Image (cartoon, coloured by chain):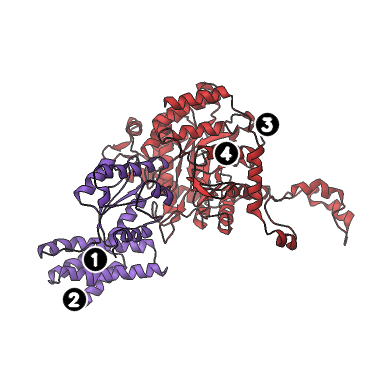
Chain colours: A purple, B red
Amino acid sequence: MSEELFKAMAQSVIDGDPDLAAELAQKAIEQGIDPLDAINKGFVPGVDYVGEQYGKGEMFLPDLVLAGEAMKAAVAVLEPEIARRGGQRQTLGTVVIGTVEGDIHDIGKTLVATMLSVGGFKVHDLGVDVSVGKFVEVARAVNADIVAMSALLTTTMVRQQDVIEALEDAGLRSRLKVMVGGAPVTRSWAEEIGADGYSEDAIGAVAVAKQLLGVG
Amino acid sequence: MARPIKSISDPRLRLDILTPEDVRRIHEATLEVIETVGVRFPSPKALEVWEAHGAQVDRDRMVVRAPGHLIEDALKKAPPVYTLAARDPSQDLPLDGNHVYVGTDGCGVQVIDLYTGERRRSALKDVAEIVRVADYLEEVAFIWIPVSAQDCPPETRGLYELKAAWENTTKHIQTESIYSEREARASVEMAALIAGGREELRKRPVLSYALCTAPPLGQDPGTLEAALVAAEAGIPVGFMTMTSCGTTAPATLAGNLVVGNAEVISALAMIQLAYPGAPVFYAAAQTAMDLRTGGYTGGGPEDFLFGAASNILADFYNVPLSMGSFATGAKEPNWQAGIDNSFSTFMACVVMSDMLLGVGLLHGSRIWSYEQMLMDCEIYDIVYHMMKGIVVDDEHLALEAIRAVGPGGNFLTHKPTKRHMRELWVPKFMDRRPYEEWEAKRDGARDWARAMAQRILETHQPDPLDPKLSEELAKIIAKA
C-alpha cells in the first residue's frame, strides 16, 4: 500500500506538481506513515531521478526547479508531523543567502536558493537589497554554515567585500563559509575579497556548498 | 581629423517578421498587462509622476497600474526623429529611421590584454584605450562605455568613464553605466560643458542614456531617478529590456515580447508624463535562458528573431530603437562568435534598427576582446554591403560589357570592370589566400585583427579635448 504511495510521491516530484505532492504528503500523515519515510522513500527518489536525468541532458533546469518546488511543498506538510513525533529532518547545513545592498536583482539568487534547498540545505533567503548588518544578524541568529551573496552590478559587487569584513568584525567569519556569485563576479574577485566559494551558476553552487562543508 | 562613419541607409532588403495584426495583438496584450498586472516603479519620484496623471499606484508594492489610453497618449508626445550629437558635428547621428549605427558593446568586467593575451579585470585605462580604437573605426558610430573602470570608486565610476571617453573620441557617447540621481546630475553638468551650456546640450545632446529595466515587469530605482534627471536636461533616454524566456519572461517568444514591451513602454510613458516631448528610445536585448543552466545565452535563434521583431515594435510606437546584437556568448572569437554575431546583426539591420549594441565583448558581454571588436566590425561591413541589395538598371545590367566581351572572353580587361570593381566587397580578416601560403604561416583572422588593433592604438590620435575642459570635468567629478 505505502509502496504505491511512495511511487506516486516520486512521480509528483518528477512531474513537478507541488499541489499533488502536498496532497500525497497529507495522505501519508492520514495513513500513519512515518513522515521521514515519506520524504526519504517517497519524494527523495523523485528528486534523485530528476537529478540523474538532468545529468544525462534528458531533463532541463525548469524540471529541476519544479521538482524542487514539489519537494518543498511536501516537506512543508510533513515537517510539523516530524516535529510532533519528536524527530528531526537532517540537512546538509544552513545557508543564509541574499542579493547585496543597492542591488535588486533577484532571479539568479533565488535559483541558487532553490537548488541549495533541493540539494538538502536549510536555506534562509533574505531577498534583495540586503544590508551588510542584516547578513551578519541573520547569520548569527540561525548559526549559519554558509553565507551566500549575489550581485549583478559592478558597483554593488564591492558590498560582498563589506559583508565579509563585517562577518570578521562580528567574530563570525571563522565559523562559516562565504560564497559569492552574480554575472560580473569572477573567481579572481572571489579570491581577492577572501570568499571561500564561487560558482558561475546555480547547479555549480550546490556542488561548491557541499564541498565547502565536506558533505553530500 | 574626425573619421567618417559607415552607417546603413536606403536599404534594399526587407523582412516581414510580424504582421500588423501580430503587432496589434502584442500591443493590446501589453496594455492589458500594464493596466491589470502593473509594473513596479520602485522610486517615490516616479510614483509621484504616475499619481499626478491618474494612474493607480500601490505605494506598498510600488506597483503602477495605468490605463491603456494614458500610455498611448503619453507615447504620442515622444519625438519620432532627433539627432544624437557628437563632439565633432560631422559625426552627428540623425535617428531618422533611415540609418543603422553601430556602437561599442558594454559594460564588460574583464579585458583580454591586447599585447599579452592575458585576461584581467577592466580598469579606467582600458576604457580610454578601447574608446580610442573605436574613434578610429568607421564602423563604430557611437560609444557605449565598453568596460567598467573598476579601479575608480563605485559611486563616481560612471563619471570617470565618461571623462575618459570624451578625452578619446569625438563621437557620440551613450552611457549605460549611470545608476543614480547624483551621478546623473554630475553627468548632465559634464555633458553641458562639452556641448557649451545647458541650452546647447538640449539642442545638441552629446550624451544619451541607455538604462536597464528590471524584468519581469519592474524598473530599477536608481535608474528611474537618473532617467528623470537626464530627460529634464534634454538628454535622450532609452530603457532596455533583457527579458529572458523561461526565467524573467514566459518561455514563449510572444510572451517574452509582451513582458519586455510592458517594461519599456511604461518607462518611456513615465518620462513623457514627466517631461513631454523629451527624446526617448526603445532598447532591447531579449533572449532565452540556457535550458541547462538558466544562464544568459548571448545568441541563438530566439535572440535573432527578437533582434528583428523589436524594431517593428519601436516603429509602432514611433521611437528609435537601440538593439542588442553581437554580444556573443562565446568564450573566445570562434565559430560560435561568428554565427551569433552575424545572425543577430543581420536580423537587426534588415529591419533598420537605429542603433546596434555593440562590437567587442565575449561571454555574454562580460569579456572585452579587441580581436572580436575588429572582427565584429567586419561582420557589420558584410551586412552593410548586403543591405545595398542588387541594383538593376541599364548600367548594372551591363549589356554593353557583355556584348563587347562575348562568348569565351573575360571581363578583367574590360573598362567597366574597373569602374565597378570597388562595389565588390574586400575583406580584412577573411582568409582567401592560396592554401600553401596559409599552411606555411598558419595565421588568420585573430592575428590580423590583433595586429590592426595594436596599430590603431599605437598611431591613432583622436582630436583632443581641450585640456581646460578636461580639468573642468575632473572638478565636476571631484564634487560629485
Give the residue at x 55% y 36%. Answer: B128
Q: Badge 3 is on which residue?
A: B1
User: Marks 2 and 4: same chain?
Assistant: no
The chain holding disc 1 is A
Looking at the picture, tell me which residue is in the foreground, B111 or B52. Answer: B111
Instruction: Say which of marks 1 and 4 sits in front.
Output: 4
Q: Residues within 10 Å of mark 3 (few under 14, many from 20)?
A: few
The type of residue carrying mark 3 is: Met
Does the image show residue B114?
A: yes
**For residue B477, above or below residue B16:** above
Question: Label 1, label 2: how many angstroms apart (C-alpha)?
Answer: 15 Å
Q: Does dot 2 land on a helix, a strand or a loop? A: helix
For the residues labelled 3 and 4, the Cα–Cα distance comes to 18 Å
* Residue B435, placed above or below residue B117: below
Q: Quadrant of the C terminus of chain A?
A: bottom left
Q: Amino acid at mark 1?
A: Ala
Q: Secondary structure at mark 1?
A: helix
Q: Nearer the viewer, mark 1 or mark 3?
A: 3
Q: Which residue position is annotated with label 4?
A: B129
Q: Is residue B400 left or right of residue B370?
A: right
Looking at the picture, which amino acid does disc 2 mark?
Answer: Ser
Label 3 vs label 2: CA separation?
83 Å
**Which circle's residue, 1 or 2, is located before the other in the chain?**
2
Which residue, given by chain and number where applicable, does mark 1 sit on?
A21
Chain ID of residue with mark 4: B
> Which sits in the foreground, A149 or B200?
A149
